[in-house]
């Protein structure tokens, strides 16, 4: 009995030593945890507003308007070769509402996401006529939208392609580089998921332009529903290797239809990553769906960033 008690105490001391390292220890690499929380909003036209979503003043908060798409706005939309139009709920998420939420909360930034899964009743394809023409049109049309809405960044969420990976990489890479160089945006993210075609395009982009991509919003909720904490940690490790050097954010889907859900251990995984200094941020798809549950998981996500080392230890091991 005494041996078991001593063994448990020894293990606990090792864990606490890892969580509370000695100040005189040799200098380590800078911690990689952040307090970044991001949420997609506006794709489902259910009247969700910025002001509906709880915002913790201690986090860096990004709303991501979903979506701007380079299709026309006819009843049967067609590709426009980089000429983007607004396809989010602009009645409830207008330029004045962007300005209002940013003035009320100094920690809030707002971005727009490009592409998405669908437009009208069909897929939204990345379908450029040529690299030069697409980039020229995209820079012009997006600059106009971004300046009209006073946005801060862009997110790349194309999921269907009529161009090869190298063309995608060159178009998107040059777009991000030009918008940043012109001072139009201050950050850019990509939103891949575990699909062979999707990954081939985004990994080509990462290989050529990863140094100007600030965040990887990896869609972990695209994995099978019922994902376990252990599987999630393995997936995170795999994608962190794929997007080597990138800030890979963890994610869940509000309706629980895929991946590791908040009710089944998502926050346990977050605490584990934070204890390993690998919690680069959390994002959610989406505010539109979360409206039905009162944004309970948005609150919990943002609270996660404020836990002390002892609280993290409790959530993981007790």
Image (spheres, rainbow, N blue to C red):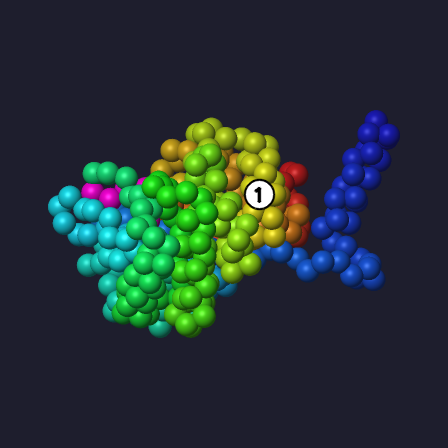
- Give the quarter of the figure containing the C terminus: top right
Up the image or down, 213 lies above or below 107; here it is above
User: Residue 195 appears at what percent x and percent y?
Assistant: 45, 35
Q: Is residue 200 left or right of residue 72?
A: right
Can you say which quadrant of the picture contains the N terminus?
top right
Circle 1 Cα neighbour tier, 10 Å, few/some/many (<14 / 14–19 / ≥20): some
199 or 260, which is in the foreground? 199
Q: Mark 1: which secondary structure?
A: helix
Residue 137 visible at all: yes
- Specify the farthest residue to the left: 75
Kindly identify which residue carries mark 1.
242
User: Residue at the spot x=38%, y=33% of the render?
Assistant: 257
Residue 200 point in image, percent of width and height = 48, 40
The residue at 43%/36% (across/down) is: 197
- Left or right, 8 with respect to 98, comes to right
On screen, residue 80 versus residue 175, left or right, reads left
User: What main secondary structure does the magenta stretch of the protein show?
Assistant: strand
Across and down, in percent, residue 41 comes to: 32, 52
The residue positioned 32% from the left and 50% from the top of the image is: 128
Q: Is residue 116 magenta?
A: yes
The residue range painted magenta reads 115-120
Where is residue 132? Give x, y as percent: 36, 59
**Magenta run includes residue 241:** no
From the viewer's perspective, is residue 136 above or below residue 267?
Answer: below
Q: Which sits in the foreground, 252 or 123?
A: 123
Residue at 28% x, 39% y: name it: 123
Residue 116 in view (yes/no): no
Q: Residue 252: which quarter of the image?
A: top left
């Amino acid at each position: 009995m005494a041996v078991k008690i001593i063994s448990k105490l020894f293990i606990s001391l090792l864990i606490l030593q890892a969580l509370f390292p000695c100040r005189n220890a040799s200098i380590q690499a800078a911690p990689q945890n952040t307090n970044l929380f991001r949420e997609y909003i506006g794709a489902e036209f259910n009247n969700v507003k910025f002001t509906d979503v709880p915002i913790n003043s201690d986090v860096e908060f990004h709303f991501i308007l979903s979506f701007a798409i380079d299709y026309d706005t006819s009843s049967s939309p067609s590709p426009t070769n980089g000429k983007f139009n607004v396809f989010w709920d602009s009645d409830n998420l207008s330029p004045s509402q962007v300005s209002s939420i940013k003035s009320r909360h100094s920690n809030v930034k707002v971005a727009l996401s490009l592409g998405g899964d669908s437009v009208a009743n069909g897929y939204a394809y990345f379908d450029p006529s040529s690299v030069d023409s697409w980039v020229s049109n995209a820079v012009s049309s997006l600059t106009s939208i971004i300046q009209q809405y006073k946005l801060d960044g862009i997110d790349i969420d194309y999921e269907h392609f009529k161009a090869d990976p190298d063309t995608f990489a060159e178009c998107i890479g040059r777009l991000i580089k030009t918008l940043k160089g012109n001072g139009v945006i201050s950050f850019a993210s990509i939103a891949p998921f575990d699909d062979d075609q999707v990954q081939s395009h985004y990994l080509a982009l990462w290989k050529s332009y990863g140094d100007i991509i600030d965040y990887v919003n990896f869609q972990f909720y695209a994995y099978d529903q019922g994902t376990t904490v252990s599987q999630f940690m393995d997936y995170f490790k795999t994608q962190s290797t794929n997007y080597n050097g990138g800030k890979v954010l963890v994610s869940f889907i509000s309706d629980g239809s895929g991946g590791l859900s908040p009710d089944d251990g998502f926050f346990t995984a977050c605490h584990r990553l934070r204890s390993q200094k690998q919690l680069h941020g959390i994002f959610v798809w989406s505010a539109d769906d979360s409206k039905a549950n009162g944004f309970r998981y948005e609150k919990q996500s943002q609270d996660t960033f404020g836990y002390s080392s002892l609280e993290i230890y409790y959530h993981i091991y007790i």
